[in-house]
Image (cartoon, grey):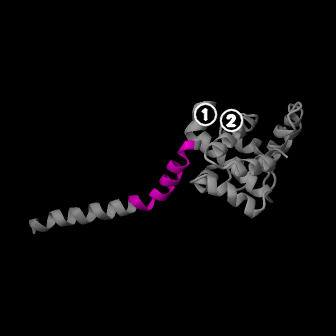
């Protein structure tokens, strides 16, 4: 029976590769979004998980504020956006805008006033991003990092030919 041993090993190796390959779509999603994640890590000095989670939190908040057609334009410009959105703390729940959230909602509510006071004359961008405070804190980032993530994400969209999507995203997150 020894001649059959290599074929069994080959069969087991093939089965193992199929199991591993089943997880690859998520890895591919993350790799596709790598341009954005790389930009965030290099420009802001955050870790890859922080970049993925922070970008995902921004996109989740935008999805809540945009109509589906508008958000679809953003989705089309960010390969792997679903993986990023899933990497955000709480999944698609951001701040206190979903029913059940005393976690992020409480922190977002407490910091909203403080953040709003720091906006200066920039059109209230930080105040509009206050619902992200809980998500960014969960990632080990200060709430004001949301205002540093947004320009990098907008720059990424503009450089990838998604100027229209960048404008929609900016309007949803700063207005």
Q: Residue at x 83, y 44 (%)?
A: 128
Q: CA distance from mark 1 to mark 2?
A: 9 Å
Instruction: Return the x and y of residue 153 as percentages of the image width and height.
Output: 67, 42
First of labels 1, 2 by sequence position = 1
* Residue position for label 1: 46
* SS assignment at label 1: loop
Residue 94 makes an appearance in the image? no
Residue 39 makes an appearance in the image? yes
Q: Foreground mark, 1 or 2?
A: 1
Query: Residue 147 sits in which quadrant?
Result: top right
Instruction: Return the x and y of residue 67 as percentages of the image width and height.
Output: 78, 61
Query: Residue 54 sits in which quadrant?
Result: top right
Q: Residue at x 55, y 43 (%)?
A: 35
> Where is 140 relative to 78, above or below?
above
Instruction: Return the x and y of residue 141 as percentages of the image width and height.
Output: 68, 35
Please name whichever residue, 172 or 97, is drawn nearer the observer in this view of the structure.
Answer: 172
| Side (left or right) of 7 relative to 155 | left
* Residue position for label 2: 141
**Magenta span:** 20-35
């Amino acid at each position: 029976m020894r001649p059959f041993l290599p074929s069994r090993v080959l069969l087991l190796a093939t089965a193992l590769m199929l199991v591993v390959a089943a997880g690859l779509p998520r890895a591919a999603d993350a790799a596709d979004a790598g341009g954005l994640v790389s930009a965030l890590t290099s420009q802001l000095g955050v870790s890859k998980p922080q970049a993925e989670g922070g970008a995902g939190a921004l996109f989740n908040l935008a999805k809540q504020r945009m109509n589906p057609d508008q958000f679809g334009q953003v989705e089309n410009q960010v390969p792997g956006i679903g993986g990023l959105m899933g990497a955000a703390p709480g999944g698609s729940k951001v701040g206190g805008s979903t029913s059940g959230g005393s976690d992020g909602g409480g922190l977002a509510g407490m910091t909203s006033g403080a953040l709003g006071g720091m906006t200066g004359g920039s059109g209230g961008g930080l105040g509009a991003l206050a619902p992200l405070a809980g998500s960014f804190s969960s990632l080990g980032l200060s709430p004001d990092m949301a205002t540093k993530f947004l320009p990098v994400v907008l720059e990424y969209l503009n450089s990838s030919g998604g100027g229209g999507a960048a404008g929609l995203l900016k309007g949803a997150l700063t207005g």
